[in-house]
Amino acid sequence: MRISTKLGLVLTLTSASILGSYGYGQFRREEADLKSSAEHEARLLGVALQVAVENALRDGQAADVREMLESLEVKDPGVDLFVFNAQGKLVVHSWGGIKTLPLIESDVHPLTGAPRSVTRFHGPEGLSHLSFVFHLRDDDGSPLGALALVKPLDALREDLKTTRRDVLLSVLTLIVGSSLVGWMLVVLYIQRPLGRLVGAMRSVVAGDFTANVVPHQRDEVGEVVLAFNAMVKELGAARNQLTAEVEARIALEAGLRRVDKLATIGQLSAGLAHEIGSPLLILGGRAQALAARTELPEDVRRNANILVEQVERISRIVQQLLDFSRRKPLRLEEMDILVSVRAVVDLLELEARKRNVRLEFSCPRPLPRVLADGDGVQQVALNLLTNALRATPQGGEVRVSLTPSAFQRAGTSERQAVCLSVEDTGPGMSEDSMKHVFEPFFSTWSSSGGTGLGLAVVKAIMTEHGGAVSVVSPEGKGGQFFVHFPVAPVDAVVEVVA
């Protein structure tokens, strides 16, 4: 049921209850006023007749009483009059009064005691007849009899009928009018604004975060519209931020892939330089010796020169590969490692949600500052987190933490450090795999496109930092990598490591 219909029904019922109660009360007041007016008129007539009849009875003029009643019968045939003697016996009555005599018989007796008058409304709801009984007294107070007056209330009933109809029509008109006005107000100020708001919501659900509703009212509905516009604006900004983060993540992953490619080229270049360097030197030297011997035939010396040129060409290619793949020198500086790690965690939060993996990050404050390369720290964190997310099944958890630590490399003393720990709830690794996990081109995800260079790069970066990396990954119980970045000494200076 639409809200306009609900409010319309509520308004109609409320109006009907209030106006109906008011109309009923108004009708009852009108009824009381009409009865009071009729009673007042009849009482005035009865009092006048009471005085006249008492005087006539004192003087013994009963005939005058009869003439008086007949005269009144002619002027107002609807009023019935009765005169009783002191014994309560009917003496004189109007022509048609016998029919209404039972209405006042019970009020005639007794005639003894203090003088009194009795007024009654007869019939359903007291709207049939009005009766008055006046006790007649002599000058000494002795009872002379009683005068009774019965007046029909036909005119009063007609007036009340007209009043009831007018009140009912007025109440119905007010109910219909107020309901229509209320319904129009609901449509104008509630239904239509909410309809526009619902349309804008559907646009937002469809992905349009530019949807906006123009507020036409300065009331609660207008406040809802303003709040909705602010919410859509924030959602749009959040989506733009997420889009920017996704683009940054893609760019970062692309850079990582480039680094992996460079690492691969570096491995190949180093292997080529080592494996073919010596044979090339020998081959080049022999070719140069042959080309320098003038006693040899021209074609032999020409072929020797060709060999010299090709050897030099191969040497240049290998050197170019070495120059291209050689890592950028690290720029070590005193830094807050939390900033770099937090950036990577924030970057991969969306990826974790897509994989339905819970990503937790904890870090006590304060942490000692480390001597490290910011880009190198981010690359280490990115490689470890990417591997952890890949290893964790849906519904799993990856926990990242930064804590003060200490480590010791072979042949060195213990050093203070900050440990980056990355723990996942994946399948873990076998003991054989753990032995080769930091070797280039070794990967447990070869079937999924793993190159086996991510952890090798982590190992290389940590070696250049003078730090340490280790892994604990029992099969079937997940894995945990520990990376120790050395704490910056008090007199730390910027250092470049080739």
Image: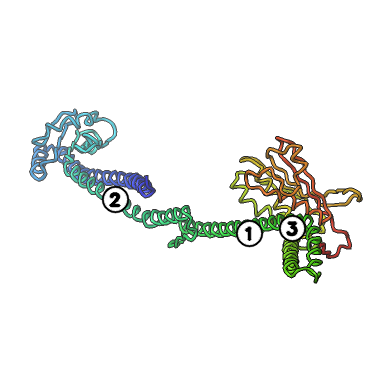
Question: Within 10 Å of the Cα at label 1, are there few (<14), some (14-19), or many (20+) other Cα atoms?
Answer: few
Secondary structure, mark 2, is helix
Tell me which corner region of the image, top left, top right, bottom left or bottom right, holds residue 188. Answer: bottom left
Q: Position of residue 393 (x, y in %)?
A: 63, 40
Q: How many marks?
A: 3
Residue that label 1 marks: 251
Indicate whether 294 appears above or below 325. Answer: below
Q: Nearer the viewer, mark 1 or mark 2?
A: 1
Q: Which of pointers 1 and 2 lies earlier in the amino acid sequence?
A: 2
Foreground pick, 53 / 455: 455
Number of the label disc, if any, that sits on residue 176: 2
Tell me which corner region of the image, top left, top right, bottom left or bottom right, holds residue 126. Answer: top left
Number of the label disc, if any, that sits on residue 269: 3
Q: Real-space Cα distance between discs 3 and 1? A: 26 Å
For the point 75% across and 60% down, which residue is it? Answer: 374
Q: Real-space Cα distance between discs 1 and 2? A: 68 Å
Q: Which of pointers 2 and 3 lies earlier in the amino acid sequence?
A: 2
Q: Nearer the viewer, mark 3 or mark 1?
A: 3
Secondary structure, mark 1, is helix
Q: Position of residue 225 (x, y in %)?
A: 47, 58
Q: Position of residue 235 (x, y in %)?
A: 54, 56
Which amino acid, by three-letter code, is at mark 1?
A: Ala
Which amino acid, by three-letter code, is at mark 3?
A: Ser
Indicate whether 298 appears above or below 156. Answer: below
Q: Are marks 2 and 3 in contact (CB under 8 Å)?
A: no
Which amino acid, by three-letter code, is at mark 2?
A: Val
For the point 72% across and 47% down, which residue is it? Answer: 400
Q: In this view of the protein, can residue 137 be seen by the observer?
A: no
